[in-house]
Amino acid sequence: MAKRIRDLTPEVLRRALVPLGPLPQRTSEEFTASGDGLVMDLGLNACRDWSVCVVENGTVTSWDVRFEYSLDAVNWTEISDLTHTRAITGDGVVKGTTPAYPATHFRPRVDELTLGGGTNITVYILGMP
């Protein structure tokens, strides 16, 4: 006889679930000045493929956004393929790359930001396992 829904305890349900594996990781952060962004700790869900997009709010004069990743959140490596500038990349353009190694921590770093007539930039990051 089949079990009724009310007979399924949390333990039975937990055993029935199929793990999906690592999921994509994404974040966004607003900047009004240069500096390091928040560190995202992925734990054991390391990501290998990365995309970065910068969107201006208003007419921002210039920006230079770098993407860094790490295994320990202390020693950071910049992925030069993901450097995003207003002059070269432009507003709202997505850049992506697959670095040589996966990482468990990542952050944006704004090297330079001149707001001019704008109010801020938003940096979007997506990591795929």
Image (spheres, rainbow, N blue to C red):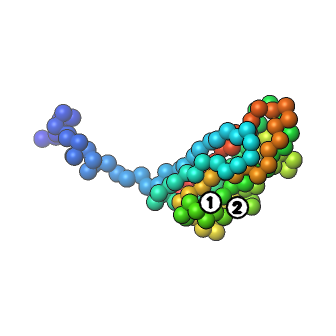
Indicate left or right for 47 with 3 as reference. right
**Quarter of the image holding residue 90?**
top right
C-alpha gap between disc 1 and disc 2: 8 Å
The numbered disc on residue 79 is 2
Q: Is residue 34 above or below residue 103?
A: above
Q: Nearer the viewer, residue 65 or 11?
A: 65
Q: Position of residue 118 (x, y in %)?
A: 81, 32
Figure quadrant of the N terminus: top left
Q: Amino acid at mark 2?
A: Ile
Indicate left or right for 22 with 8 as reference. right
Q: Position of residue 125 (x, y in %)?
A: 64, 48
Crowd class of label 1 (few under 14; some 14 to 19; many from 20; radius 10 Å): many
Q: Position of residue 46 (x, y in %)?
A: 52, 60
Q: Residue at x 67, y 39 (%)?
A: 30
Q: Is residue 94 visible?
A: no
The numbered disc on residue 109 is none
Q: Residue at x 66, y 44 (%)?
A: 124
Q: Is residue 56 above or below residue 88?
A: above
**Residue designated by label 1:** 69
Evaluate if marks 1 and 2 touch, with contact meaning CB atoms under 8 Å apart: yes
